[in-house]
Amino acid sequence: MNITLDLSPVVHRKAGLATYARHLAEQLLALAAGEAYRAFHYGVPAAPLGAPLANLPRVAVPWGARRWRLTVAAQYAVGATMDHRFAGADIFHATEHLLPAFHAVRSVFTFHDAIYALFPEHHLPLNRAFLGLLMPRFLRRADAIIAVSECSKRDAIRLYGVPPEKITVIYEGVNPALKPATDPDSVAAARARYAHNAPFLFYLGTIEPRKNISAIVDALKILRAHGAPHRLVIAGRKGWLYQATFDHIAQTGMRDAVDFLDYVPDADLPALFAACDAFVFPSLYEGFGLPPLEALACGAPVVCANTASLPEVTGDAALLIDPHDAGAIAAAVTRITQDAPLRAELRARGFVQAAKFSWARAARETLAVYRRVANQPAGAR
């Protein structure tokens, strides 16, 4: 079976989508189950694939993102297909929200989330228009759909009428390199380097309105008004519509208490998770929500929104809060910082919860979907 994996999110550094595509592809290769894999991407890579993915045979289109999207949209509009560009492929796995039209090539489509439909104000207009028009067609045309959570599956069924039997829920995993930091010197060094040696709250993720970083800032202001010495440390690149977050920090007078780290190497994350007093993640919606799971795997106490997939992912290992209630966030942080037995209990629960999620398992379950699709008639075209 010849499988083409869309690794565009990896070469274009698309945050959570890149994490998904890269780790899944690496674990599929590690299975060594007899399948032949090939990498696909559009445009000029912004980042190398890295070993072992760099060794894959590769097919690419030279167009940038806009032309690639417009080409796919036009083919759906006129009934054309892209089989000729993927000669020899049995299956194409669309790992981001774009599925080329095929006639003979079977397809698997990963449905990550429905943010563009549920929170349109937090999406760029062109993205919103593209996904609003074509997502129903992608889901209808795919031979099988992988949802990254039960929440995403429910949204696909509710919003687009996808038959439940067409969807397989396959959870994402935790990077095996993310383990508790056990060296006190490395933890102290992380606190000194990233937080000015002060107690701090930690956030990891893209900076965009849906992530609701402003609520952490408001909670931090409440905490500091009651004498807490904490800072907020934010690790992650700018996404879209990020300026409102920076404006809110300035307007609340909290600029001197917030540190933006931009991208932080994975190797530094365990020490940051160990050094923080709490990992705070009040996102309004997540299709899966990998950062709080990574925090649990590293032993950090987690304060997390009670929305979308996040309760599903964190289980009983996090304090769940209303993401719109800064007072509730501040109260949860206070509980964690003042209640040592609670911290210890959450840490133990976190390890148990994180152990349920692995990329190796995701790869095995994904391969099972490929094999099922290969043995069934092609879907409606």
Image (cartoon, grey):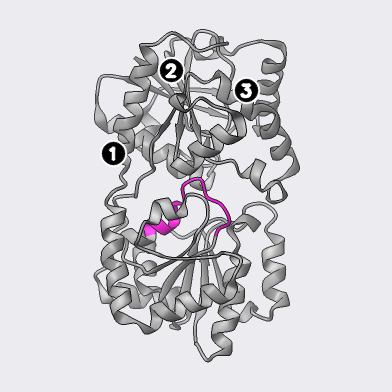
> Does residue 166 sit above or below 51 in this rendering?
above
The secondary structure type at the circle numbered 2 is strand
Cα distance in 3D space between marks 3 and 2: 18 Å
Residue 28 on image: x %, y %: 32, 31
Cα distance in 3D space between marks 1 and 3: 30 Å
User: Quadrant location of the C terminus?
Assistant: top right
The secondary structure type at the circle numbered 1 is helix
Report if residue 292 lies within the magenta region: yes
Residue 212 on image: x %, y %: 60, 62
Sequence-wise, which precedes: disc 3 or disc 2?
A: 2
Cα distance in 3D space between marks 2 and 1: 20 Å
Give the amino acid at mark 2.
Ile
> Does residue 201 sit above or below 315 in this rendering?
below
Q: Tell me whether the residue at label 3 lies in contact with that at label 2, contact meaning CB atoms closer than 8 angstroms.
A: no
Report which residue position mark 3 lands on.
137
Report which residue position mark 1 lands on.
360
Report which residue position mark 2 lands on.
91
User: Quadrant location of the N terminus?
Assistant: top left
Q: Which residues are magenta?
A: 283-294
Q: Is residue 49 visible?
A: no
Q: Is residue 358 visible?
A: yes
- Name the residue rendered at 26%, 19% in the picture: 34
In this view, the mark in front (3 or 2): 3
Residue 281 on image: x %, y %: 50, 63
> Does residue 255 sit above or below 34 in this rendering?
below
- Name the residue rendered at 49%, 82% in the picture: 230
In this view, the mark in front (1 or 3): 3
Mark 3 Cα within 10 Å, few/some/many (few <14, many 20+)?
some
Mark 1 Cα within 10 Å, few/some/many (few <14, many 20+)?
many
Q: Tell me whether the residue at label 2 lies in contact with that at label 1, contact meaning CB atoms closer than 8 angstroms.
A: no
